[in-house]
Structures are given as structure tokens and as C-alpha cells.
Amino acid sequence: MRVICKQSSNLLHTTKHCKTIKQLHQVHAQTITRGLLSLHPSSSLLLTTILHSLTSLLSPHSLSDIHYPLAIFNQIKNPSTFCYNTVIRAHTLLSSPLDALLFFARMRRLGIRPDAHTFPFALKACGLHRSLSLTQALHCQSVRFGYSNDVFVVNCLISVYSVMGRVFYANQVFDESSDRDVVSYNALLDGFVKAGETARAREVFDEMPVRDAVSWGTIIAGYAKLNRFEEALGLFDEMVGLDVSPDNIALVSALSACAQLGELEKGKTIHEYIERKGIRVDAYLSTGLVDLYAKCGCIETAKQIFETTTEKALFTWNAMLTGLAMHGHGQLLLDYFSRMVKARVQPDGVTFLAVLVGCSHAGLTTEARLLFEEMESVYGVSRELKHYGCMADLLGRAGLIREAMDMIEDMPMGGDVFVWGGLLSGCRIHGNVEIAEKAAEHVMEIKPEDGGVYSVLANIYANEGRWDDLAKIRSLRDSTMVKKNAGCSLIQLNGVIHEFVAGDSLHPLTGEICFVLNGIGQHQFEAL
């Protein structure tokens, strides 16, 4: 008996240090061939250890790997709470929440008492299953078993309610808890950010006794998400000034803010910080850098970063394709799209929007037609209004007004402002008054307050010399509550962003700028 127990101890020690599932299979085979499974309670201890080791090696994307651990579980006589926790956690890891919850129900039916680890695993499964009723039922049971103030259970409840968009419940759990840590605050902070309640998120952030990189990253991402880019960058600078190392969420959010504001120099500073600190550039960071340089006019730098990136996710490819489209590199854009497909990266709607925009700007009508046709049949990507709008703009630019009109009439859904607006722009370029009037009528019906449509139609009438119609459309515009977004330009000079809005003279150097422009105009006139 002593020899057998020694063999059992050695196998347990070996099991804890196994690094591959194959080795664990060998250990399991040894327990069978040496007759160790006939022992009790040593057999349960061995199988429990093997079960835990197997589940710790599971890959999140391979559900089939759960069958062997389940076979081990079924061999254990009277599985303990630890065994059930292990299986529930494994199913949650494998994104199989219903099975995880079924094991929880089986555990309770057999009268096995859950512990502080059971509820977080089961609650995470509820979050994956998106079941509010089950979450509330587990919440009640956690209170019944005395875990209402357990920090791990509380944090998981806050997180799960937040994931489901029930931030009120998350806040209630937070307020009723007497034991909170930085994770508790971060979970509630994330909930408010996801719900778009940045003001409430800021209140939580300001009252936090301790903040970590996650806290800073979450609030910075919240401001960036709501297009409050200056505030996002201000918080980022404050974070770095306090010697808090930013995580990738904070870095990506700051880079996104720089891209949207055209803050190239600030973006370069963040890039230098990443390199100086030796931060690993993953797919998210590389995407943020590609997006920054592409939107700030440095497409060659964006290409260099893209090419040196080893982790190219779908969104990384999309950022590169969008950048190439913005810069009018139509043929190069198609080459990159072909590389993407050859790399077995499945394109999505954003991919095709970038490609179609690039083709439109480069006048690649034939190529755009083919890709638009293949979207659903070859790539399995559904056409959306934005894709139809892009095609309407492309065909209109090319003078294929009738083809664009036929496409719109054959659409499975009604056209929106961008679809009809794209057609209207083409009519303006090529002077097609008849279809322009139909397109304008649709735009006015969908969005009567849009002032742009009146201006375009007035321009078309003026070019055709139809003065009576021009007077009518101007009268209609004046009698309708229309809005026209003023044009805005940004330029960076010596590290300072200068903004110019059409129709105003608020810039402090407006006089000097107008003097120079008038001088240029006079010089051009004299040169003619």
C-alpha cells in the first residue's frame, strides 16, 4: 500500500509540471495501468489533479478539447465543489456558457455547496449568455450563501451587469458593497464608459482612492469614444506625467485622438514613447499608428509601419486600405486587397467600403463594379447602404448616371441621403437635370433640413441657364428650416493647430492672411 501511495504521489507531482496535453494523457494512462484508480480517496485526488491540469491547458477557440476533461470528470466519484468549479470555468473559457450554467444547476441539484470561486465563473457564463434573469438569480444565490460582500463576486456582478448595459444595477451592487478594490472601481468605470455616461464615469474616476493603468486607459477611451479628443489627450499627458505606464487601450485611444485632430507631432511623440519604453506593438497599436500617419498625410510612414507589423489583424488591414483610399492610391489599394485575401484574412463591410472609396477617387470603375458584384457571392459580405452610396458616387463621377439610377431602383432597401446624394453629385458634374431633380426630391424627403441639396440643385440650374427654376429652389430653401455645415480647415504650423471656418474671421491673423492672399491673387492676375 505504501508503494502504491508513493507512486500516486509521484504521479501527482508529475501532473502538476506537465506542459502538454499529450503528457497528461500519458499520466492518465499510467494511473490506469498501475491500478491507482482502484484506490479511494487517492483515485479522486489523482483524477481531480489531472482534470485541473487539462483544463488549464485548454485553448479558448477549441471546444472539442473539452471532451477528454469531461470524461475524466465523469470518472470522479462524488465530485467536489472544486471539480465543478473547474468544469464550469472551462466551459466559460471555451465560450460555451449554457453548458457551464447546466453544470452549475447540476451541482445545486445534488446539494453541493458553491464557494466564492463558483459564482464568478458562473456569472461570467451569464455575461456570455446575455441572460439578465439568470444573472439576477445567481446574484440572489450569492447573497443567500453569504458572498454579497466577497470582492471577487462583487466585481464580477458589476462587470456582468455592465456588459448587459444594466449600469444602474452595477452601480447599485457597487454602492451596497463594503469591500471594494481598484478592480471594483474599474468595472463600474468601464460600465459607465460603455453606456456613454462619461460624466458619471469621470465622477467615479475622480473619487477613486487608487488608480492603475486600466483606470486611466478606460476613462481616456471614454472621452475618445465621444469625440472629446482634447480631453482624452489632456488625461493621457496627465497620466504620463504621474509616471503611470499607459496600457495599450490608453495608447491606442491617444493615437486615435491625434489622428482625428491632425496632431501629427503629438502622435509622433507618443510613437517615440512606445519605442523608448520598448512596448510591444501588437495588432491594436500598429493599427493606431497606421491610422495616425495615414490620416495626417504620411502615407509612406503608415506603409512602413504596416509592413513591419507581424500581427496583421483585419482592422490593421482595414486601416491601411482606408489610408490608401484617402490618398487616392487606387491601384495600390487593389494590390493590398489582393494580398489580404491571399493571407486568408476575411474582409468585412469596412474593407469593401475602403476599396470602393479608393476606386471612386481613382476612377477605377470596372474594378469597383467587379468587387461590388463579388461582395456577397464570393466573399459573403452583405451590401449595406454605405456601399450602395459609394457605388452611386462612383458611377455618377464616371458619368454613368442611368446605370447608377438602375442600381438604386434595384436596391433591396430604400436609398438614404448618401445614396441619392452621391447620384446628385454625379448629375451636377455631368449636367443631368432630369435625374438630378429626382435625386434631390428624395434627399429633401429624407432630410429636408439639409441645405447642401438646395445648393447643388441651384448650381445645376444656374449652369443650364434655368433662371426661373433657380429662383424657385432658392425661395424653397429660404422658406425651409435648412442647415448647412460650415466648411472647416485645419493646418499645423510650428506645433500649433490653426482652424479656419468658412464665413468667419475669428482667427487673430485674419487681416495678414487676407493681405497675403490678395497679393497672390493680384500676382496671378498680372501674370495672365
Image (tube, rainbow, N blue to C red):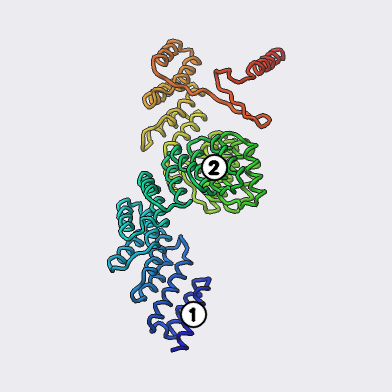
Q: Which residue is mark 2?
A: 253
Residue at the extreme front: 178
Q: Is residue 462 above or below residue 176?
A: above
Label 1 element class: helix
Up-down relation of residue 497 to residue 188 (above or below):
above
Q: Which residue is mark 1?
A: 11
**Residue 370 seen anywhere in this rendered image of the structure:** no
Q: Kindly identify the amino acid type of the residue bearing the numbered disc 1.
A: Leu
The secondary element bearing badge 2 is classed as: helix
Residue kind at label 2, given as amino acid type:
Ser
* Camera-nearest residue between 454 and 461: 454
**Residue 56, image x, y percentages:** 47, 66
Image quarter (top left, top right, bottom left or bottom right) of the C terminus = top right
Residue 261 visible to the viewer: yes
State yes or no: discs 1 and 2 in contact (Cβ < 8 Å).
Answer: no
Residue 7: x %, y % from top left: 48, 84
Q: Earlier in the sequence, mark 1 or mark 2?
A: 1
Residue 366 is situated, as x and y percent measured from the top left of the image, at: 52, 38
Alpha-carbon distance for marks 1 and 2? Answer: 49 Å
In the figure, residue 101 lies in which quadrant?
bottom left
